[in-house]
Image (cartoon, grey):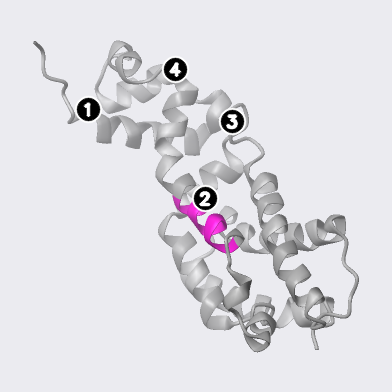
């Protein structure tokens, strides 16, 4: 019985990552990926059904991290929160935002693949879909504040989606434009001044 050569996998994924980043999924060439990894196309097809499955393998860890981020925020137990804690969820906290940017910085390469290079794959609307999922989470927080009499503004789900899309685009763009970490730190401070959720929702 032959033993699978696991040394192929890291260099295959890195070669694929480089090719997808350079050309995007649609224009990426599987033969080039194989040549740069020093393997045959047969070795790829033993592992993946095709180019799209290979792309999904490249971004899987990052997609899982981001999925976990959304899941935690969507699964908040409001019953255990005080009114002050509910109010605080809408305050732009620079430390929290900087921690978010640090998390995204650690996965920035594959994050950009998901946002900018995934056309033609199951992830091609990733940025929009992520903002939509965050809209659902934000609506839960908003409705909790509203039900407690802590928010005066009347915000529809469509309006919340517009706000969330704007907010998350401001988070995506520094990575798409390859900002340095120093510039991202300053961008984080600007965002905390610019996006005042407490005013948008009229938090009391």
Q: CA separation, marks 4 and 2?
A: 24 Å
Picture quadrant where residue 199 is located:
bottom right
Extreme-front residue of the structure: 79
Residue behind mark 2: 67
Extreme-right residue of the structure: 154
Q: Earlier in the sequence, mark 4 or mark 1?
A: 1
Q: Which residues are magenta?
A: 65-73
Considering the whole magenta stretch, tell me its main secondary structure. helix
Q: CA separation, marks 2 and 1?
A: 28 Å
Residue behind mark 1: 8
| Disc 4 + disc 1, Cβ < 8 Å | no
Q: Residue 109's spot in the image, x, y percent?
A: 45, 49
Which quadrant would the C terminus be assigned to in this image?
bottom right
**Which label was assigned to residue 122?**
3
| Camera-nearest label, 4 or 2 | 2
Taking the spot 48% from the left edge, 54% from the top edge, the residue there is 68
């Amino acid at each position: 019985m032959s033993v699978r050569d696991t040394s192929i996998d890291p260099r295959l994924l890195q070669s694929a990552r480089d090719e997808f980043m350079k050309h995007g999924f649609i224009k990426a060439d599987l033969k080039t990926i194989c040549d740069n990894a020093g393997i045959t196309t047969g070795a790829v097809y033993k592992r993946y059904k095709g180019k799209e499955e290979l792309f999904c393998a490249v971004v899987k860890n990052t997609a899982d991290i981001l999925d976990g981020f959304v899941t935690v925020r969507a699964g908040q137990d409001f019953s255990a929160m005080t009114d002050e804690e509910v109010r605080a969820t809408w305050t732009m906290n620079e430390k929290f935002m900087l921690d978010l940017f640090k998390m995204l910085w650690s996965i920035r390469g594959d994050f950009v693949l998901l946002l900018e290079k995934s056309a033609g794959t199951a992830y091609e609307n990733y940025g929009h879909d992520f903002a939509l999922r965050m809209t659902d989470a934000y609506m839960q927080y908003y409705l909790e504040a509203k039900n407690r009499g802590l928010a005066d503004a009347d915000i529809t789900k469509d309006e919340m989606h517009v706000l969330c899309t704007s907010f998350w685009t401001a988070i995506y763009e520094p990575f798409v434009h390859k900002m340095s970490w120093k510039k991202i730190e300053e961008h984080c401070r600007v965002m905390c001044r610019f996006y005042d959720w407490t005013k948008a929702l009229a938090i009391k």
